[in-house]
Image (cartoon, helix red, strand yellow):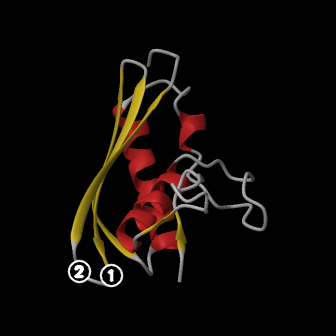
Amino acid sequence: MMNIDFPFHFDSRGRTASTGEADHIRDMIEQFLFTNAGERVNRPDFGSGLLAKVFEPNSPELATALQFSIQAGLQRWLGDLIEVRKLEVISREGTLTIDVVYALRSTGETTSASFARETGNGI
């Protein structure tokens, strides 16, 4: 089975770029985090809605709520592929960072990934 690399691009041969399973799962986590509900065709409730929350007043309660909702969403959409071991949401100086530690269910390998986006609003 071919795993298409994200973001979509072409490889050096001019073909659709592919990637391995571990990188593909990381790509799917990133897609879930930065997709808003309603953006995906045939999956209207897919996505964390995280980018909409960055305009909320920054507080420990918001970070905790985001962590719980993101963990639940990852469990729902990717629970057959990963087990989330640790999740941290950090909003600092206009940058939103999500650190995730997860285990691949297929191999048991523990992996960590960090995802960041500029929010542009200085929260």
Question: Mark 1 sits on what residue?
Answer: 105
Q: Is residue 41 left or right of residue 50?
A: right
Q: Nearer the viewer, residue 52 or 24?
A: 24
Classify residue 19 by image quadrant.
bottom left
Residue at image position (52%, 16%) is: 121
Q: Are marks 2 and 1 in contact (CB under 8 Å)?
A: yes
Q: Nearer the viewer, residue 75 or 111?
A: 111
Helix, strand or loop at label 2? It is: loop
Residue at image position (39%, 50%) is: 67
- The percent coordinates of residue 113 (x first, y second) are 30, 52
Query: Going by the picture, which residue comes out furthest to the top?
Result: 122
Helix, strand or loop at label 1? It is: loop
Residue at image position (54%, 77%) is: 2
- The percent coordinates of residue 114 (x first, y second) are 32, 46
Crowd class of label 1 (few under 14; some 14 to 19; many from 20; radius 10 Å)? few
Q: CA distance from mark 2 to mark 1?
A: 5 Å
Q: Nearer the viewer, residue 29 or 22?
A: 22
Q: Is residue 5 left or right of residue 89?
A: right
Crowd class of label 2 (few under 14; some 14 to 19; many from 20; radius 10 Å)? few
The three-letter amino acid code for the residue at tag 1 is Arg
- The percent coordinates of residue 53 (x first, y second) are 55, 35
Residue at image position (43%, 67%) is: 25
Question: Mark 2 sits on what residue?
Answer: 108
The three-letter amino acid code for the residue at tag 2 is Gly
